Image (cartoon, rainbow, N blue to C red):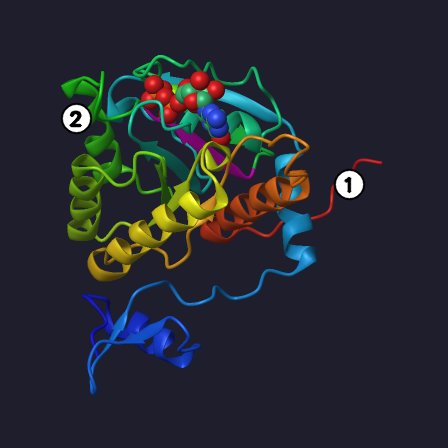
């Protein structure tokens, strides 16, 4: 049985779950080609996460050097990915504030690390993109931040399923694996592909992760703009966003208490 390079613990967890994702390679061997079904998320957990992100969100600081990072004690998650993949848009969507972070259809828009406080419980970090129209110093800033930031609980790595995985994405994953940093992949711009094309791209990305990525959380998240009424799936889009919120809450390990405000 081939379970890529996963840790023993993860392998045991995977083996305990369903075997639907295993396909026969030959008579004796099986190959893992997709992540197992993630543990179910209850409506209460989704509601807790949604409640947290409905709380006030405040810009903390922008930095151009890792040592300038704010001294907060809050658990932190950061969003990383190729330029134009939709990092800043995702932060706006999560916080329901389209003007919190500036977005642009021109790659290379975000040039600093931008920190935001959500409900005084967690910190979100928007990052410059890598790849097309990126700058070497931005890459240095990201790597420096990743290797020094103790508060960082999980890195969310955004991938555009239209473009698929690029060499730069794979290099970053390999770097994160070597540093034992936990990351989770979010597929963005779901609305830009047909159901079939999206499923094919997702399967290819997932296969690569299963076979190569060590510290990747074994669940792919999905986001995308609300689609036209033709598809009538705004509920699906809202549910996908709630799952991203829950993944963040889960990664940070915080408990969301009901608001005391009436
Ligand atoms: N169709 C579609 N477009 C999106 C989606 N998310 C973001 N975009 C668009 O993609 C472009 C880039 O979005 P940004 O959020 O600025 O991307 P970024 O990753 O922050 O880019 P950089 O800061 O340049 O690295 C903008 O024109 C967004 O409107 C999505 O889910 N669907
Ligand atoms: Mg940006």
Ligand 2 falls in which quarter?
top left
Task: Using the image as rendered, state which of residue 22 and residue 249 is in the foreground.
Answer: 22
Residue 113 lies, with reference to residue 158, above or below; the image says above
Q: CA distance from mark 1 to mark 2?
A: 42 Å
Q: Earlier in the sequence, mark 1 or mark 2?
A: 2
Q: What residue is shown at x 37% (from left), y 75% (from top)?
A: 13
Quadrant including the C terminus: top right
Can you tell which quarter of the image residue 20 is in?
bottom left
Residue situated furthest right in the rendering: 262
Look at mark 2 in the image and give the residue it sits on.
140
Q: Residue 23 vs residue 195: left or right?
A: left
Q: Residue 159 vs residue 246: left or right?
A: left
Task: Using the image as rendered, state which of residue 169 and residue 234 is in the foreground.
Answer: 234
Question: Main structural element of the magenta stretch: helix, strand or loop?
Answer: strand
Can you tell which quarter of the image residue 126 is in?
top left
Q: Which residues are magenta?
A: 121-127
Q: Residue 45 vs residue 32: left or right?
A: right
Look at mark 1 in the image and give the residue it sits on.
260
Could you tell me which secondary element the residue under label 2 belongs to? Answer: helix
Residue 231 lies, with reference to residue 87, above or below; the image says below
Residue 105 spot, x, y in % from top left: 40, 14
Could you tell me which secondary element the residue under label 1 belongs to? Answer: loop
């Amino acid at each position: 049985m081939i379970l890529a390079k996963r840790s023993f613990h993860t392998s045991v967890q995977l083996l305990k779950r369903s075997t639907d994702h295993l396909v026969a390679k030959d008579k004796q061997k099986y190959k893992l080609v997709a992540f197992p079904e993630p543990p179910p998320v209850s409506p209460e957990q989704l509601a807790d996460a949604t409640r947290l992100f409905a709380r006030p969100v405040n810009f903390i600081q922008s930095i151009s050097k890792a040592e300038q990072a704010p001294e907060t004690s809050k658990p932190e998650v950061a969003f990383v990915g190729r330029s134009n993949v939709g990092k800043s848009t995702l932060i706006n969507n999560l916080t329901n504030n389209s003007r919190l972070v500036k977005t642009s259809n021109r790659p290379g828009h975000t040039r600093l690390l931008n920190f935001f406080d959500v409900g005084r419980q967690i910190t979100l970090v928007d990052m410059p993109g890598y790849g097309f129209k990126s700058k070497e110093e931005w890459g240095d800033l990201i790597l420096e931040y990743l290797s020094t930031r103790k508060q960082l609980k999980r890195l969310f790595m955004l991938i555009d399923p239209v473009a698929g995985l690029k060499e730069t994405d794979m290099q970053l994953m390999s770097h994160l694996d070597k540093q034992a940093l936990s990351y989770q992949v979010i597929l963005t711009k779901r609305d830009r592909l047909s159901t079939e094309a999206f499923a094919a791209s997702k399967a290819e990305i997932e296969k690569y992760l299963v076979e190569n990525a060590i510290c990747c959380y074994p669940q792919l998240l999905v986001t995308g703009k609300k689609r036209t009424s033709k598809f009538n799936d705004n509920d699906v889009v809202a549910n996908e966003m709630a799952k991203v919120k829950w993944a963040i809450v889960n990664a940070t390990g915080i408990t969301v208490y009901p608001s005391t405000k009436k």
